Amino acid sequence: MSEVSERRNFYGRIRGKTLRASQKDYLAEDLGPLTLRGVTRDENPSRAVLDLGFVQGPLWLEVGFGGGEHLVHMAAANPGVTLIGAEPFVNGIAMLLGKIRGAGVTNLWLHPGDVRDLFDVLPDLSLTKVFLNYPDPWPKARHHRRRFVTPEYLTALARKMAPEAEFRVATDIPDYVRQTLEEVPPAGFDLVRQAGLGGAWGDWLSTRYEQKALREGRAPHYLTFRRR
């Protein structure tokens, strides 16, 4: 298959409100050194497997880290783990970089783009924990195929996760829960825990998206899967 034919459609937002001067500085000064090399098609058109020499300890991934508070929290709480955050939204990336400066964590790397490009080049069986927190709900029925919990994403994710690896999903959208429960197990996962409000994981840090959902009367759902 040619490189051109492998290009994918991407439907999420890339940019939002105008960045503050400090956020522009974070992007200019900090993003480059923290960005994984060899992930994009421009850098790696042959899609060669990524060299994981930078990894110390288990490798975890957060898909779509939003403002980055959960990702930085996990990095600070687990210094023996290496984390990757994948996020295409520039404003979220800038927010995360500011939090990294404040926390001083050094075990965190970024892919500022489509997570599917990362799945192309990560070694199989390399991930031991993956987080999907408050993903874009794509509420219209005709857009449900754009959700992360669809075979295009889940099949690739399953290949990258080691046996017994944990996949966590947090969402405030009941129909996203429905689709998650329908689509994730056939991709190679077992549901090991499902909880509602008050049932978050012991190391959970509530995100700004969760706080917004609670203010607007939407209850969180926490689902834990185990890779077969």
Image (cartoon, rainbow, N blue to C red):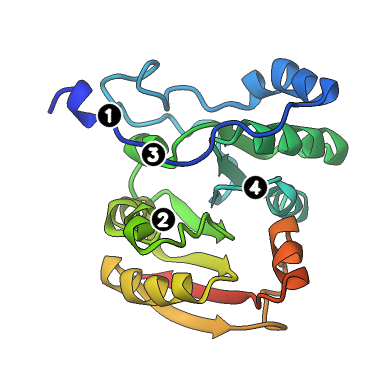
Q: How many marks?
A: 4
Mark 2 lies on a secondary structure that is loop
In the image, what residue occupies the spot 65% across and 34% down? 16
Which circle marks residue 50 in the picture?
none
Say which residue label 4 marks.
66
Say which residue label 1 marks.
7
Rendering quarter of residue 179: bottom left
Task: Calculate the distance from the C-alpha at mark 4 to the C-alpha at mark 1.
Answer: 24 Å
Task: Calculate the distance from the C-alpha at mark 4 to the C-alpha at mark 2.
Answer: 15 Å
**Which of these two is toward me, 109 or 132?**
132
**Closer to the N terminus: mark 4 or mark 1?**
1
**Closer to the N terminus: mark 4 or mark 2?**
4
In the rendered image, the vertical position of residue 110 relative to residue 25, given as above or below: below
Q: With 127 as the anchor, is 199 left or right in this view?
A: right
Instruction: Report the quarter where the C terminus lies.
Output: bottom left
| Labels 3, 2: front one | 2
**Tag 3: residue type?**
Leu
Mark 3 lies on a secondary structure that is loop
User: Could you tell me residue 29's position as x and y percent?
Assistant: 74, 16
